[in-house]
Amino acid sequence: MSIPFSVAAVLARGAIEENNYAEITDPRILRLVERTDLQCDSSFTAAFPAQQGAEVSIGLRNGKTIRQRLDNVIAATSQEIRTRFRQAAADAIGGNRARGLEELVDGCERLPDSGVIAKQCRLEPAERLLRPAS
């Protein structure tokens, strides 16, 4: 979860969506990542953990700067995270494997080897052919 990559992907693709992370070598995104400067803000730090703020400042070629600031970014609820995960996982690996993956993650502290989670996430060669290109 790289903040510079996430911001660059949104700027390059014009949307906040799962597909922003589908092609981590996209030259448009990587060009913006190279130009990204992540900085700490003392007012955000002082307000944490009661609030978790963020600001994005974009310098345009014409010299103008666009800024957007939120003093408190509202985090997704556990239910929202699970719903999003279930949909994304089912789309990628199918509903049955997605449910199995969720169970593995929920019980990960009891697993002797976390590699079983990574294995469950892998697409089989035939599955890769069936998935639409991003």
Image (cartoon, rainbow, N blue to C red):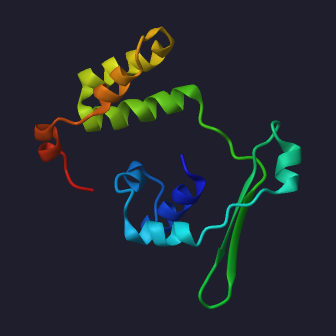
Q: Position of residue 10 (x, y in %)?
A: 50, 61
Q: Position of residue 7 (x, y in %)?
A: 56, 60
Q: Nearer the viewer, residue 114 or 105?
A: 114
Q: In screen coordinates, is 12 left or right of 46?
A: left
Q: Where is residue 134 in the image (x, y as percent from the top left)?
A: 27, 56
- Which residue is situated farthest in the bottom direction here? 62
Q: In this view, does 61 lie above or below 128?
A: below
Q: In screen coordinates, is 122 left or right of 45?
A: left
Q: Is residue 57 above or below residue 23?
A: below
The residue under the point 31% across, 31% down is 121
Q: In screen coordinates, is 60 left or right of 134?
A: right
The residue under the point 41% across, 55% down is 20
Q: Is residue 3 above or below residue 66?
A: above
Q: In screen coordinates, is 20 left or right of 129?
A: right
Q: In which quarter of the image is residue 42?
A: bottom right
Report how many numbered discs are placed on residues in the image.
0
Q: Is residue 64 above or below residue 73?
A: below
